[in-house]
Image (cartoon, rainbow, N blue to C red):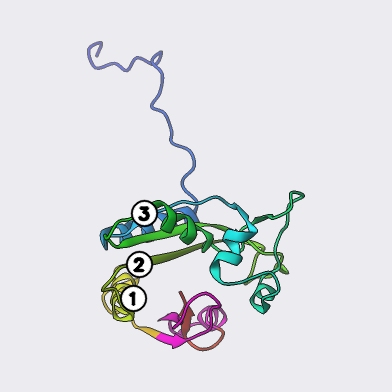
Amino acid sequence: LSSGAIDVTLPGAPVQRGRLHPSTQTLRRICAIFAGLGFEVYRSPDVETDANNFELLNMPEEHPARDMWDTFYTTQPGVILRTHTSPGQIRAMRAFGKGGSAPIRVVLPGMVYRYEQVTARSEMQFNQIEGIAIGRHITLADLKGTMTEFARRMYGDDARIRFRGSYFPFTEPSVEIDVYWGLATERDRMITKGTGWLEI
């Protein structure tokens, strides 16, 4: 009995507390998928210059595309909270595009800020992730192939996606990409606005 006794004076095994937020888990999974496809994860600041956020993305001061976002301005002129992760494209091109002929392939995850009404579907700050690929022989077909493979890895081998022509002031041609979510439940109808397709 004495050899098998438990010493109750020893400290107990530590209990792990907490876990990563579902948004953090999802962002990490997305970044891991793109890393597996040859993209580097590039982080850029949440506080940006007006030039990086708008002007260098082909949206000068009076451009109507600026009306798409209600921007949070700081007390310092020309400094804002970024309205999208696209300013990171400017920083990535400057960091990786100096004189090299190798393609640039990065994904840009992060929080973005827009002064919007808070509803069950929208918030004034949210996570966004985008990618950029620049090279001599990179085409729209590469975008379609990359996104198709991403959807397969993220949503399963039978994932269905569609490409829709869209307008973005700083890219041409531009597309929106949707994954088929389904309409099995009322929640599915709410998430997809009754279409069955979820914009990714």
SS at mark 3 in the image: loop
Which residue is disc 1 drawn over? 143
Looking at the picture, how far across and down is residue 23, in whole percent? 49, 57
Q: CA distance from mark 1 to mark 2?
A: 8 Å
Q: Residues within 10 Å of mark 3 (few under 14, many from 20)?
A: few
Q: Is residue 179 found inside the magenta-colored segment of the image? A: yes
Picture quarter containing residue 149?
bottom left
Magenta part of the chain: 163-192
Residue 189, given in percent of the width and then of the height, sits at: 53, 84
First in residue order: circle 3 vs circle 1: 3
> In the image, what residue occupies the spot 43% across and 80% down?
177
Q: Are marks 1 and 2 in contact (CB under 8 Å)?
A: yes
Q: In the figure, is residue 60 to the left or right of 192?
A: right
Q: Which residue is mark 3?
A: 98
Question: What is the number of the mark on residue 174?
Answer: none
Identify the amino acid type marked 1. Leu
In front here: 113 or 42?
42
* Residues at marks 3 and 1, CA–CA distance in whole angstroms: 23 Å
Query: Is 193 left, or right, of 5 in this rendering?
Result: right
Question: x%, y% of residue 144?
Answer: 32, 79
Q: Amino acid at mark 3?
A: Lys
Pick whichever of labels 1 and 2 is earlier in the sequence.
Answer: 2
